[in-house]
Image (cartoon, rainbow, N blue to C red):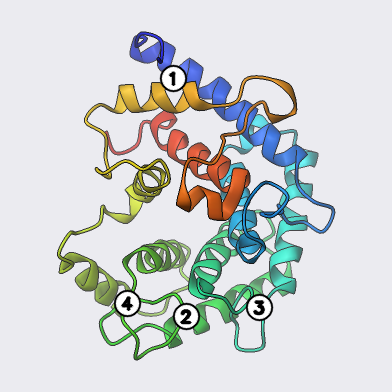
Amino acid sequence: PPPRLSPRPQLYQQAARSLQKAVRWLAANQEPNGSWSAKKWGGQPEYTLATSALALLAILENRQFLPPSTLQQNIYRTVEYILLQQHSDGSLGPWCGMRLLNHAIGSLALLKAKKFLPNYTPLIQGSNATMQFALATQTKQGGWNQLGLKEAESCPNTTLWMLKFLLEAQKQGCLSHPQPIYAALRYLKHLPKPLPPPQRLFFYLYSASSGKINPLPPSIQQFSYSLIHLQEKNNSLEGSWPPQNNYSSAGGRVYSTAISTLTLTLIYQKENF
């Protein structure tokens, strides 16, 4: 069982050490082509783009734990990999059952990377194209589905990722009109079981990948400690998190590590509590 709870200051110190190990593991296991292989780490190959984008997001949120040269290399190589997966219609990733999930997470990663490569023309152009594809595939309900079909039923998870992407675009001044955001919020608000707000997305995703029923734990401190306790402590896997069930098994260890890192980052940064 997890050890007894620590006072909050000590918990933040433990979270910092955990995050440092996590981003170092991610940075050390990037493939030469800029991706993080889902298949190599126990996942399905069609999710490699999404897992790679998640890994970059986790690194960007904890960039203080990496040397500047390593960070810049991770960013550039991942951006190059994602842009190579872009099609003429602006979409990202292979045509598969979770097409829009790849696109949404990849688009968010490109948008976040623009802060670090502000003058890189292929990135600017590619990011603009992902936005056009996202807007073109929003359903009449206001959400998005896995295949990017306007007439099909919207998917809450995919919509939440797309909404997070659009909110970041609005923050950066890349979204000309907020109407797509309003439409997505209306769709999510009227679900039978409303999802958490976008800023708590990683709690929701971690809960799903861990098999938890409730999207948010009753005790943030207990949740944090449990997450740190599950992190690998030895050998070449130190700093990573093992896949828990169906969600994380699809993406593999990289997915589990990136999602766990992003979740713990929210706690470490003392946001929303």
Of the 4 image quadrants, the one containing the C terminus is: top left
Badge nearest the viewer, 4 or 1? 4
Q: Which mark is residue 12?
A: 1
Asked whether the residues under the numbered discs 1 and 2 touch, taking CB atoms below 8 Å apart as contact, a structural biologist would say no
Percent x, y of residue 96: 57, 76
How many neighbours does mark 2 have within 10 angstroms: few (below 14), some (14-19), or many (20 or more)?
some
Measuring 55% from the left and 67% from the top, which residue is drawn there? 102
Residue 88 appears in which quarter of the rendering?
A: bottom right
Report the residue that reaches farthest toward the bottom. 151
Among numbered discs 1 and 2, the one appearing first in the sequence: 1
All told, the count of numbered labels is: 4
Looking at the image, the residue that sits furthest to the right is: 32
Q: Distance from label 3 to label 2 (Cα)?
A: 23 Å
**Mark with earlier residue (3, 2):** 3
Q: Position of residue 117 (x, y in %)?
A: 69, 59
Q: Which residue is mark 4?
A: 154
Asked if labels 3 and 1 touch by Cβ distance under 8 angstroms, the answer is no
According to the picture, the residue beneath numbered tag 2 turns out to be: 147
Inspect this view and state whether residue 122 appears: yes
Q: Residue at x 51, y 83 (%)?
A: 133
Label 4: which secondary element: loop
In the rendered structure, the answer to whether residue 117 lies left or right of residue 257 reads right
Q: 10 Å neighbourhood of mark 4: few (<14), some, or many (≥20)?
A: many
Q: Circle 3 is placed at which residue position?
A: 125
